[in-house]
Amino acid sequence: MKPYRANVMVCAGTGCVSNHSLDIKKAFEEEIKKRNLEDEVQVVTTGCNGFCGAGPIAVIQPDGIFYQFLKTKDIPYLVEEHLLKGRPVKKLMYVPPEEEVPIPKMNDINFFSGQMLVALRNRGMIDPENIDDYIARDGYRALAKVLTTMTPDEVIEEIKASALRGRGGGGFPAGIKWETCKKAEGEPKYVICNADEGDPGAFMDRSIIEGDPHSVLEGMAIGAYAIGVSQGYIYVRMEYPLAIERFKIALKQAREYGLLGKNILDTGFDFDVDIRRGAGAFVCGESTALMASVEGRIGEPRAKYIHTVEHGLWNRPTCLNNVETWANVPVIILRGAEWFTSIGTGDVSENPWGGSKGTKVFSLAGKINNTGLVEVPMGITLRKLVYEVGGGIPKGRKFKAVQTGGPSGGFIPEELLDLQVDFEQLTEAGSMMGSGGMVVMDESNCMVNMALYFIKFLIGESCGKCVPCREGLRQLDYFLEKIIQGKGVMEDLDEIESISETMMTACLCALGKSAPNPVASTLRHFRDEYITHIEQKKCPAGVCKALISYEINESCIGCLLCLKQCPENAISGESKKLHIIDQDKCTKCGVCFSVCPVDSVDIISGGEMVYHHKASKVEK
Amino acid sequence: MTEVNATRETKPETVQLTIDGISIEAEKGKTVLEAARENDIKIPTLCYHPGLEPFGACRLCIVEVAKSSRPGRKRLVTSCLYPVENGLVVDTQSNVVLKHRKIVLKLLLARVPESDVIRRLADEYGVHESRYVEREDADNCIMCGTCVRVCKAIGVNAVTTLSHGLDKYVDVPKKDVCIGCLTCALNCPTNAIPFEETDGKRRIWGQEFNLVLCWSTGEPIGTPEQIEHIAKHSGLQLDSFLKSAKARLKEKAAESVGAKL
């Protein structure tokens, strides 16, 4: 390979691509050509860097200078200053929230420095469409190691010793799953990679496949060797076209290099992988529904008294692991179980359920400054995750809750921010690890409204097979809707609680069993907010439309802006005179509130002002 | 014939379990529900059908079990799916079971408020009314999937579920696939599939079928599509189905007289 003086690593993850990062790449190439730097500087597209909120981004190596919010018009200047004159461009660098001094180096930025990369080890360092890049960073060395120096049982022992637990949500120890599958009767056996990532706002799996597809493939091949499998499947949703494309390229390249197919590395081991595309149903992430879908049947779950490791795909023993789990496997093989268990919480010397080892990838979304994808060691506190890695809450607002584990995860309040993120502690707090979604909420979010929002999402995604999930969600929706409409009574809370309890115990699948989590956890941690809605007909966050009104206060300068913008013509007034909102006409769309240049529009609920953006500005 | 006798002689492997305090011997591979029913222990079900694979959708048959290996750990399981095992202790009427079963019945009652079957069942558990919202324009379908499963079992595959979640419903999307055999309607636990037979015609799923009448007695036998389907799958002559049972008996009698002569 030709050495270059500098490498421009342009992020080509889905977030950045949709922000036109491929145009940025083109602009770099053109500019570099124009200045005859082609022999010195190389432009590379990488997988997702995770800092999607700052996209499109590019990192200039070897110095690791991080540039964000790039526009094509910035590129000529950037090339001239940085690549020609050696003067990094400050105005395109990252500036921490509420600070003024930019941070040039990627690794000095809290978002990146707080992370620990295992599953995402090649993030931003390789071209995902080039197998040589992967191999250059120790790729397929783990596969070579197991095929040439380890017996299948030794591989299983190593994974068991690492206490690697499933990253898709269940947290089941992967080594035990592999061992059970290996011992199960029936041939042929299968391995499947679950890439049916359905949580809104979660993109861990997509990012891994888009950014480093070979790591998943290598993990699957190692698992296949250990279990005694020659056919694998990856189940990806249709909504991930780039992931499918990159995985296809990876398969093709791996076959060409003899790392997939017959007689891999001349060891007599045969293994190949096929892609199965799902139609994007949330429930198809559930193992039995997923297998039904791969077989071409309707994606509905079945009870798992008979496990899929014994009777799975086409009734054969099947080992299903999530993308992130598979991506962890090669690193464990290369660096050893001892190293892996040195990261994380608990004691796993007795059994793998004793703790949570290794790292976990989370997608940070919602009211947080650094929106994006992060990989952190298990056991990191929620506070550190939100305030350091995540950069805190925008606009100086107050943190209210974080929802972990996807749409059927629970809400964790501020009092529990110091809990360590691992499988057990999240469950104890009434939430779960799930696949790693994290949605942060601040004081402008109404908890009752958020609970209803997620119930509505789950209504859209329930398969409708079993009574408690289908009919329970219908009733939860009814009672929650009643409360936010100001028609709730205290007995409704009892109904919500008893329905939730039945759903958690009597539903058929894990999705149904966890579906009441958003309601149950908000009711547990934010019960006051429910009671305020019911008894005082007041929404403290100023969100529930039926319980609020917009009113213009004395500080109005009469600028006519809200009057012109109001879609219902509900505002009357003259220039330089106080404007008035006609409450009968107002649909509470909030336009006046957002356009007012002097913050004269108040939100009134339960007879008092409940939320005023001035307040947060003053605090700041 | 000898083969059948041979299997009868080898006694199937059995397990010992306890259901509601009664010690029971059950064949290995059976479910808790099957074992209970064989011993006249009542567990309510709606989506269970003895001729079909268990489905586990109605959740009424939930029971509490404790394995012999961990007697202290009680779990709520679906008895139509849960396989019997040695030393299993089952409680079909525990407080936990009753609590959740009642909620399931309340949920069902809100779904199909007009269904006599559900009302009677709910009544047995003391569930009469609730504060739940009733489904608007509710039919009697509880989405147990029995119609879909029986239709598949007889090899027709006309009835299917459409949509998902709360809006899920059953229908016959491809009309020409349905043979008008009534298997779905007659197996529906809540009689939610309407059909009628008048003037030599049968109407079901918005379609009208002709009825074949027995040449001898004039009774309706079934639709032509249905008879053709049965003939095809049984490998018998179509003719043999065009007679009612009574006519077939008559014919047989005549044949035997003829043979004697």
Image (cartoon, rainbow, N blue to C red):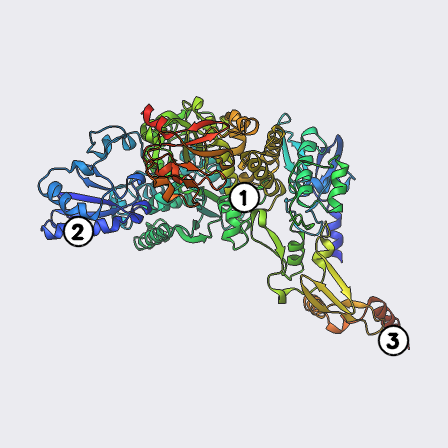
Marks 1/3: CA–CA distance: 68 Å
Residue with the mark numbered 1: A459
Question: Is disc 1 surrounded by few (<14), some (14 to 19) or many (20+) residues within 10 Å?
Answer: many
Q: Amino acid at mark 2?
A: Glu
Mark with earlier residue (2, 1): 2
Callouts 2 and 1 on one subunit: yes
Query: In the rendered structure, the residue with mark 1 lies on which chain?
Result: A
Position of the C terminus of chain A, as image quadrant, is top left
Q: What is the C-alpha distance between the residues marked 2 and 3?
A: 97 Å
Q: Nearer the viewer, mark 1 or mark 3?
A: 1
Q: Amino acid at mark 1?
A: Ile
Q: Is residue A434 visible?
A: yes
Of tags 2 and 1, the one toward the viewer is: 1
What's the mark number on residue B259? 3
Q: Secondary structure at mark 3?
A: helix
Q: Which residue is mark 2?
A: A29
Foreground disc of the pair 2, 3: 2
Q: Pointer 3: residues within 10 angstroms few (<14), some, or many (20+)? A: few
Local crowd at mark 2 within 10 Å, few (<14), some, or many (≥20)?
A: many
Give percent across and percent down for residue B233.
Answer: 68, 66
Is A189 on the left or on the right of B152, as rendered? left
Q: Chain of mark 3?
A: B
Query: Same chain for marks 2 and 3?
Result: no
